[in-house]
Amino acid sequence: MSEVAQPAEPRRCGLVAVVGAPNAGKSTLVNALAGSKVSIVSPKPQTTRFRIRAVVMQGAAQIVLVDTPGIFAPRRRLDRAMVAAAWGGAQDADLAVLIVDARAGLTDAVREIAEKLKQGGRKVMLLLNKADLVDPPRLLPLAQALNEILSFEETFMVSALKGKGLDRVLAVLAQRMPEGPWLFPEDDLSDLPQRMLAAEIVREQVLRQTHEEVPHHATVETESWQERKDGSARIDVTIYVTRSTQKAILIGDGGAKVKGIGQAARRELEALLERRIHLFVNVKERAGWDEERGRIRALGLDDQG
């Protein structure tokens, strides 16, 4: 007697917005869950300027992670657009994950974000990140205090950097995704265009290799991408800064700094794209770029005026 075919597990798919204060570890979490580099990671706050989707397959479930800019008090036009992108990501998603730096605890910024998430009426999970750096007796009171503000669907205690506790996070997220067709092909890692990826990788190196006021007064744009017959690609990018002093810092003595930024970015792009890359990096001064509507829209953000 032949075996009766078992029905296939139904497909699930949903968007999960990862929100939180700057430097909580959102991009590190998204990269760790996706198992690949889809969002830039930096020890400096305000690294992510627009929503980046990472596609994670977990059994029959496709989890589309939306990494959002850190939520903070905006001052510039760019700041307002970044915060609007973060809240837009939370509202558009099927589920939100509030990531909190367990070392920093319940700050005013975290409290404000939790209260606003409560008003939005979305299902929200709590993820206490960097839990390995905090004495266990301190974690439970923090989780309880946050759950008193907003009744979270689940509470996780993890280390995104070390990958601890993430298996349970993925399992629960997959279980909570609504039934429905997948949004992306199974082998897609991200919907981030390659030109934007190149700019972001260069900007990560600006963040890593410069200090003080330079990183967050700089933006990077891919000016051209040329495919070559040998399978390699030539990429020309420009780093824009607001002042001549920042330009001088980025170029460095004899061009050493910008050369180091370009070399590190090229190595990473070659590893990610699995091909030879010829990367050319220019630095230009453009005062007030962070107040320009067109440049803000070029970053994939909506101008908030």
Image (spheres, rainbow, N blue to C red):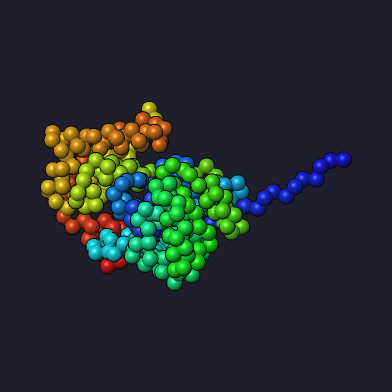
The answer to whether residue 282 is left or right of residue 41 is left
The answer to whether residue 3 is left or right of residue 284 is right
Residue 134: image x %, image y %?
40, 50
Q: Quadrant of the N terminus?
A: top right
Identity of the residue furthest to the top in this view: 230
254 vs 163, nearest the viewer: 163
Q: Residue at x 30, y 32 (%)?
A: 278
The answer to whether residue 131 is left or right of residue 265 is right
Identity of the residue furthest to the right in this view: 1
Residue 119: image x %, image y %?
44, 72
Q: Residue at x 39, y 33 (%)?
A: 271
Rendered image quadrant of residue 197: top left
Q: Residue at x 46, y 43 (%)?
A: 163
Residue 303: image x %, image y %?
30, 63
Q: Eyeballing the image, is 88 above or below 51?
A: below
235 vs 209, nearest the viewer: 209
Q: Quadrant of the C terminus?
A: bottom left
Q: Residue at x 44, y 60 (%)?
A: 141
Q: Eyeballing the image, is 122 above or below 65?
A: below
Residue 151: image x %, image y %?
50, 66
